[in-house]
């Protein structure tokens, strides 16, 4: 059997990835197909079999796949049971400050990592930003940006879990390093989107039972809170913690069988779950073909700094794929053997892929939010680009100095 030169195989694989992404083929199918294509071009059949068996039977893969499925199921059940609506409404009635609401509401709804989820908070954000007198471009920016401030420190984010597992670092170490970046993102969002806006207009004189609303919020938020507590405080694996959250949600909502089954009929939940497996498969194929040696010599000859690699490759791939998990999975495959992953390098890789994704026109939340508020992308980018630069300006010193 004749194999292609490793570098040629990588180029062919990335061309294939580009076509699949351009055709908007599901990320799960894309990653698995790319991994198999690369394997067929550089490995013999026994090696391919070993890689597939190792990937399928390894505990990290099983944990990630089950965790991804559980988190997506929790997210979809929140929507199917309408509990997310009650959660949003109660929060908007508890908080009287419109600036605080438009900062918190997208982030709280952002705890449910669903594609295009910024659209869920858009109507409530629109109502509050009207009171602040914001223009359309700032309404769009505020809803999009604040939704995405929470994920770099959210312990049950699929992308964060994927990064930790692929790079072999702990979730806690990633989260600790990314706290300064999140603080920076929140501050930048406030300065660009909400600073110097008029004072919050008085709300309509509607009687609100604050204690009742606090109780409603506490009850509807408890499934997410239970999941987070299980992971952070008790050290429960996310694959188990997600189903603890689901159990709490089912107790609260008491949905019928049809509502429980509906998410399982949605291709999105299976596509994202398959993507989690594909990310591991692609990385393992890359390791088996010793991709680090292929790129290592090229990088050594070109004297490319590791800092540049950890920024540009993930940011580019996160933007092109329209998926931070896709950008991270492919980046780890490329950088395996070149970069010795630690919490600092894994964190910069995550932040780069994530920020590249957030501001990319391939990002579903960005497109849907702009469409909802009838805002041109040109007007939106005059706020997103400075936000991106400021966030990187925090991430780089954290990488270098800490």
Image (tube, rainbow, N blue to C red):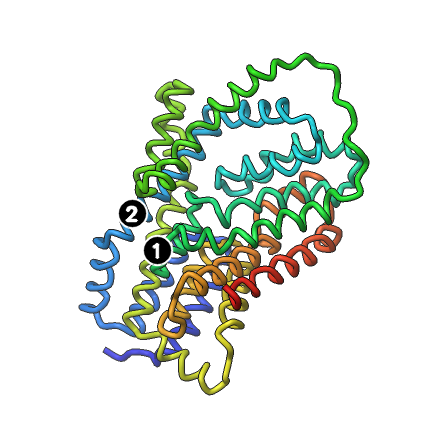
Out of 267 and 184, give the one closest to the viewer: 184
Circle 1 sits in a helix, a strand or a loop, which is it? helix
Q: Position of residue 211 (x, y in %)?
A: 56, 16
Element at badge 2? helix
- Is the C-beta separation of discs 2 and 1 under 8 Å? yes
The N terminus is located in which quarter? Answer: bottom left
Residue 210 appears in the picture as rendered: yes
Q: 115 above or below 84?
A: below
Q: Is residue 107 left or right of residue 190?
A: left
Compare residues 117 and 398 and report the one nearer the observer. Answer: 398
The foreground one among 184 and 279 is: 184
Query: Which labelled disc corresponds to residue 119?
Result: none
Task: Check the image and report above or below for 188 versus 328.
Answer: above
Q: Is residue 81 left or right of residue 126?
A: left
Q: Is residue 243 left or right of residue 318?
A: left
Residue tagged by mark 2? 63
Looking at this view, name the residue that lies furthest to the left. 46
- The answer to which image quadrant residue 12 occupies is bottom left
Between marks 2 and 1, how big is the CA–CA gap? 9 Å
- Residue at figure coordinates x 43%, y 53% from the top left: 27
Q: Residues within 10 Å of mark 2 (few under 14, many from 20)?
A: some
**In the image, what residue occupies the spot 36% across and 51% down?**
276
- Percent across and percent down for residue 173 are 41, 54
Query: Residue 98 appears at what percent x and percent y?
Result: 71, 31
Residue tagged by mark 1? Answer: 165
């Amino acid at each position: 059997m004749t194999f292609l030169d490793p570098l040629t195989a990588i180029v062919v694989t990335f061309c294939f990835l580009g076509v699949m992404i351009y055709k908007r083929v599901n990320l799960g199918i894309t990653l698995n197909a790319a991994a198999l294509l690369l394997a067929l071009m550089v490995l013999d059949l026994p090696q391919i079999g070993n890689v597939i068996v190792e990937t399928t039977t390894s505990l990290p893969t099983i944990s990630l796949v089950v965790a991804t499925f559980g988190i997506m199921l929790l997210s979809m059940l929140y929507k199917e049971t309408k509990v997310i609506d009650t959660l949003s409404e109660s929060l908007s009635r508890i908080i009287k400050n419109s600036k605080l609401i438009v900062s918190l509401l997208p982030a709280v709804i952002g705890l449910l990592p669903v594609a295009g989820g910024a659209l869920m908070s858009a109507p409530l954000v629109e109502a509050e930003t009207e009171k602040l007198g914001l223009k359309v471009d700032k309404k769009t920016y505020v809803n999009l940006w604040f939704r995405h401030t929470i994920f770099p420190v959210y312990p049950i984010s699929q992308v964060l879990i994927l990064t930790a597992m692929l790079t072999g670092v702990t979730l806690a170490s990633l989260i600790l390093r990314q706290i300064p970046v999140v603080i920076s993102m929140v501050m930048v969002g406030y300065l660009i989107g909400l600073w110097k806006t008029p004072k919050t207009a008085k709300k309509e004189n509607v009687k609100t039972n604050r204690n009742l609303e606090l109780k409603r919020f506490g009850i509807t938020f408890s499934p997410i809170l239970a999941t987070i507590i299980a992971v952070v405080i008790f050290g429960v694996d996310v694959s188990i913690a997600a189903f603890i959250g689901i159990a709490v949600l089912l107790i609260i909502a008491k949905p019928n069988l049809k509502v429980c089954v509906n998410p399982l009929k949605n291709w999105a939940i299976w596509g994202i779950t398959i993507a989690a497996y594909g990310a591991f498969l692609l990385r393992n194929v890359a390791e088996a073909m010793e991709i680090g040696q292929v790129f290592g010599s090229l990088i050594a000859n070109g004297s490319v700094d590791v800092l540049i690699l950890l920024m540009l490759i993930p940011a580019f791939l996160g933007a092109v794929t329209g998926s931070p998990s896709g950008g991270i999975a492919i980046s780890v495959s490329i950088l395996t053997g070149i970069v010795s992953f630690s919490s600092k390098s894994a964190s910069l890789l995550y932040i780069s892929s994530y920020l590249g994704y957030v501001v990319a026109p391939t990002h579903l939340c960005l497109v849907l939010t702009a469409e909802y508020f009838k805002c041109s992308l040109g007007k939106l980018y005059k706020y997103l680009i400075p936000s991106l630069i400021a966030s990187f300006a925090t991430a780089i010193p954290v990488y270098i100095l800490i």
